[in-house]
Image (spheres, grey):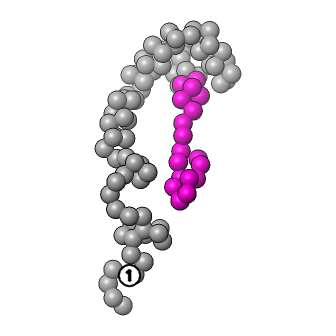
Amino acid sequence: MTTIGREQVATVDTAKLEAIQILNGLIEPKLDNLEEAEAFMAKCGPSVRAVVDKIDELSGLDKKAIEEAKARFPSSEESTGGDPAGDGSAGGDPKPPVPA
């Protein structure tokens, strides 16, 4: 997680995520740790993509749906609507919604 201005941006190490998927999703050969999963991926080369895709399919993970969700709900840095609130509130006006 990094902070750019007032925005927090999270990034994902895709290679590590896929190694974790291999480690937890592969039945045979049984891998015992992340280093073994990474070595397995290096040994298999590009063909490991088919293994990761099959793990995704069997687990119900739909990367296309994730991309569609990102498009429907862009992060605030991609958003064009509204001004930032400045005080952490959603409305942008630090006054209460109803006069006291």
The three-letter code of the residue at mark 1 reads Pro
Please tell me which residue is depicted at 34% across the width and 47% down the height of the picture. Answer: 73
**Image quarter in which the C terminus is found:** bottom left
Horizontally, is 60 left or right of 12 in the view?
Answer: left
Q: Is residue 34 visible?
A: yes
Q: Is residue 83 above or below residue 17?
A: below
Of helix, strand and loop, which one carries label 1?
Answer: loop
Number of marks present in the image shown: 1
Q: Is residue 79 above or below residue 97?
A: above
In the picture, residue 54 is in which quadrant?
Answer: top left
Please tell me which residue is depicted at 53% across the width and 45% down the height of the picture. Answer: 10
Q: Position of residue 42 (x, y in %)?
A: 62, 13
Q: Position of residue 57 (x, y in %)?
A: 38, 22
Q: Is residue 93 above or below residue 73?
A: below
Task: Find out whether residue 57 is within the magenta segment.
Answer: no
Q: Tell me which segment is drawn in magenta.
A: 1-20
The residue labelled by disc 1 is: 96
Task: Find out whether residue 17 is within the magenta segment.
Answer: yes
Mark 1 Cα within 10 Å, few/some/many (few <14, many 20+)?
few
